[in-house]
Image (cartoon, grey):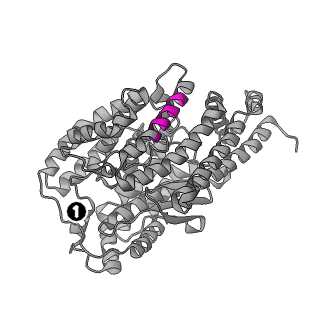
Amino acid sequence: MTNTPLADLLAFQKDTEALGQVAGRLGWDQETVMPRGAAEQRAEEMAAMEQVLHARRTDPRVGDWLAACEGSEMTEADAAKLRHIRRSFDRASKLPAALSAEIARVTSVAQGQWAEARAKDDFAAFAPVLARVIELRQQEAQALSQGGDLYDALADDYEPGATAAELGAMFDEMRPRLVELRGKVLEKPAPEGLKGSFPDAEQMAFASRLALAFGYDLNRGRIDKAVHPFSSGSGNDVRITTRTNPEDPFNCFYSTIHEVGHACYEQYIDQGYLLTPLGQGVSMGVHESQSRIYENQLGRSRAFTGWIYEQMREAFGDIGVDSPEAFYAAVNRVQKDFIRTEADELQYNLHIMLRFDLERALISGDLKAADLEAAWNERFEADFGYAVPRASLGCLQDVHWSLGLFGYFPTYSLGNVYAGCLAQAMRKDLPDLDAALAKGETSSATSWLGEKVQRHGGLYEPKEVITRACGEAPSAGPLLDYIETKFSDLYGL
């Protein structure tokens, strides 16, 4: 068969995608099983991989192939592949190769230093490397923005087209209703939590049962433990991590369901898109829509928690609550707490708003890394009404900034908004959903999401994915209505 510019470009891109997966596997290994003494060497390995990837993404032949493809007739999928390749080429071409490699090296080191500082509650030990990460990301943003907003340039990497102004407007719409409802709920007595014995091994076994219940394919995945839960990979090698707490099994179980949402998105993309630009989730906002709808609208629903209640009593014996309704209340308990990943649906987005404002200040230079802990503690007390007792419950709780993921946090709330829209549409199409969930059967919901969202991978732009699935453009209204209805019912408001 005669080679064409499109065929040559896609063959070249396939190898680039494969190498990107290898780089991702190095990151997975670093956060799960890598020996602690290998940190410095791994940093050099990651930098070397980034140099190879940057060279491929900016190869002049890519520009030539893209130009040669202009005006050619092609399928919708091939046109979408070119859109992604062109965006990557244009973005990477603005960045010096040495800067990309240095970011990879420094963030690899920073991740280990963050984990150690978090374990010791020692922000001061982490601040210098954080300052270096911020400096590098500022340089990256300056190269990408070409005089525009620095934060927008970074956020675009996670949610194409997103801007700080748009995200800020979304938060301004959400904040008043969430704050008002939280005030009313916290005036009510908190439901009882779980009591009992929840050993580590039994938690991990139960987490695997939950993963399977939501359709995670363990023939193409695995579950490990990490300091901060995450999902890694795409296609036929998609791995997740979780963590355990002997006093709080929900930490493990709902972290697992959340990461399974990410993983199932990647596993159930059309196999024809494997190792192409369409073979992974289109944006972090759409990705979070999957993890959050699995975790919350499905996993924390009254119907599904009734099934979990029976399964937990079978696995752990007495768990301290004596009815499915009391268990549902315990799963969705609203209480004063510090940790974003453990926050209830009502307060979760308020945690994101705090991070959004702080990281914008860090990137603009209005806030210095050395002052982050004090700024965090002051803002948290103003927003939540109580003081942060130690750094691991405050500015050291998340891994993101050590990895340089500035602009990532708002996609969590954007994902919640998308999930609210998807859940509303899904329930219209699946009137018997609760009856299935009460039996632990999620397949109707996960199949709906697979058909409407997951199989498309990167075929459509992020908002178009949600609009096509829901029949209307995304907005915050469905999420806010869902939260108000759920928690007003739970707390008798």
Task: Identify residue type, mark 1.
Answer: Ala
- In this view of the protein, which residue sits in the foreground, 201 or 293? 201
Give the farthest residue toward the right.
2
Quadrant containing the N terminus in the rendered view: top right
Left or right: 177, with 34 as reference point = left
Apparent side of residue 373 relative to residue 38 in the rendered image (left or right): left
Q: Residue 385 in the image: x percent, y percent?
A: 18, 43
Magenta residue check for 412: no
The crowding category of the residue bearing disc 1, from other C-alpha atoms within 10 Å (few below 14, some 14 to 19, many at least 20), is many
| Residue at figure coordinates x 34%, y 30% from the top left | 169
User: Please, what is the dominant secondary structure of the magenta stretch?
Assistant: helix
Q: Residues in magenta?
A: 129-140
Q: Quadrant of residue 30?
A: bottom right
404 in relation to 252, above or below? above
**Residue 235 drawn at (x, y percent):** 61, 56
- Residue drawn at the location 36% of the way across and 55% of the way down: 120
Towards the viewer: 226 or 449: 226
Quarter of the view holding residue 246:
bottom left
Q: Viewed as shown, does residue 366 lie left or right of 185? A: right
